[in-house]
Image (cartoon, rainbow, N blue to C red):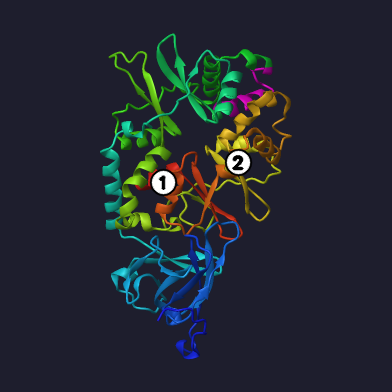
Amino acid sequence: MFGPNMDSVPDDAIVPGTVLIPMRFVWKHGGNSVYLCGSFTQWSQLLPMLPVEGCDNVFQTVYGLMPGYHQYKFYVDGQWRYDESQHHESGEYGMVNTLLLATDYMDVDNEAFRRMAQVADGPLTEVVPGISDTDLQASRQRISVFLSTHTAYELLPESGKVVALDVDLPVKQAFHILHEQGIPMAPLCDFGRGQFVGVLSALDFILILRELGSHASNLTEEELETHTISAWKEEKAYLNRQNDLHGRAFPRRLIHASPYDNLKDVVLKILQNEVATVPVIYSSSEDGLFPQLLHLASLSGILKCVCRCFKHCASSLPILQLPICAIPVGTWAPQIGESNRRPLAMLRPSASLSSALNLLVQAQVSSVPIVDDNDSLLDVYCRSDITALARDRAYTHINLDEMTIHQALRFGQESYPPYEPRSQRFQMCLRSDSLHKVMERLANPGVRRLVIVEAGSKRVEGIVSLSDIFKFLLG
């Protein structure tokens, strides 16, 4: 029976000639003292699990297993636990986690076994649950129904503020406001027309800085002092027209939502138009003039609603129990996870700031992991980080080709107040984390993506964003 018996497994428990497969077991739910015990130790030996460096509340151990079916549990701070995010079932010792190590010569015809899949993990092997097409579609259908039967009105907080900018505001002042308010974008209002006409985002600042650094630029630093947002938008349309092979501009209407739009339609607007947020606008007049800006709807807020709804019944949705490495979600390094056919972009801290900005624009990504020579995560450079250069007009005396990403990040750290450390602005996860756990982390305010790292080394294996999650959930 269970107990802290640390005697070794009897030699006769191993069939002569059997090749043991090294397995990594991970406990990701905290504790001070964590052990592993299972049928492979005849439920009589506790295997100590060690904390993973750089990953809070994560413990791991490696143990050689024979091919076949195994059950196991965790002994955490004197109590027996099982991991609800991994495949589990009721057994002789209560709820236990289970796994199957199948070989080519094993006859596997049990439905529970067929739902297991093997994923390579370097020299180790992880066994992760798969899912049938029926369960996949059923899970997606339940989430789709939830989104279709709830409205954007439910996203509105009880209290809060929404920042909007006058289109006649100088660009310099507008980006200073974005930086001071700690927001990546703001809706634009044309008070003369009584309408919201667009948004100003960190991407606009990136394009302006690239334009200033161009020898062919029509915009000077002096003009930026008085250049209005509306004038910049006209300039941006001109630049787009210059880059269009057909000589056409890219006119873009304001993407917005009504408080009565259902959440699924709001998600689709965000995904199809490749925007981060959509203003929720209400007007009591038929012509839509002088509307009220109620909220900025984001995928993070919508995901929070989904997580809150299914928090106590996540186990009934098989799709949420899958580890992210087993489903086509996110962008992965080669041979890790299921690729979405987009390359995983990473940069060294010594790379120039201009290379980071070019990558953000050309690859159409919102962030780039910054890694060392071993591809271990050091930091993340995001689009919104560029607004730090608005402080004290720093953009007027820097050279984008000479400033390194390391220098830019240090400058940004000096811009943040002491109560808002930069280390909290990006989050990590493991490839073995369940989709449900990843969703809960992404639902936190200000988190738009998770960097997937290898436990211990923090080597970057991929990145998963809010848009990745919803594209998968909606199929």
- Amino acid marked by disc 1: Ile
Range of residues picked out in magenta: 204-221
Within 10 angstroms of label 2, few (less than 14), some, or many (20 or more) residues? few
Above/below status of 134 relative to 468: below
Which of disc 2 and disc 1 is earlier in sequence?
Answer: 2
- Residue sitting at 55 percent across and 29 percent down? 202
- Residue sitting at 56 percent across and 69 percent down? 123
* Along the line of sight, the residue nearer the viewer: 172 or 133: 172
Kindly tell me whether residue 268 is visible in this rendering.
yes
Instruction: Please state, as top left, top right, bottom left or bottom right, where the N terminus lies in the image.
Output: bottom left
> Is 229 within the magenta?
no
Q: Main secondary structure of the magenta part?
A: helix
* Along the line of sight, the residue nearer the viewer: 286 or 231: 286
Above/below status of 77 relative to 57: below
- Amino acid marked by disc 2: Pro
Query: Quarter of the image holding residue 117?
Result: bottom left
- Residue 382 x, y percent position in the rendering: 57, 38
Distance, label 1 to label 2, CA atoms, is 27 Å
Would you name the residue on which mark 2 appears? 421
- Residue sitting at 64 percent across and 45 percent down? 347
Above/below status of 169 relative to 16: above
| Residue most extreme to the top | 192
- Residue 404 x, y percent position in the rendering: 71, 38
Would you name the residue on which mark 1 appears? 469
| Mark number, residue 347 | none
Query: How many numbered badges does the structure rendering display?
Result: 2
Kindly tell me whether residue 214 is visible in this rendering.
no
Q: Secondary structure at mark 1?
A: helix
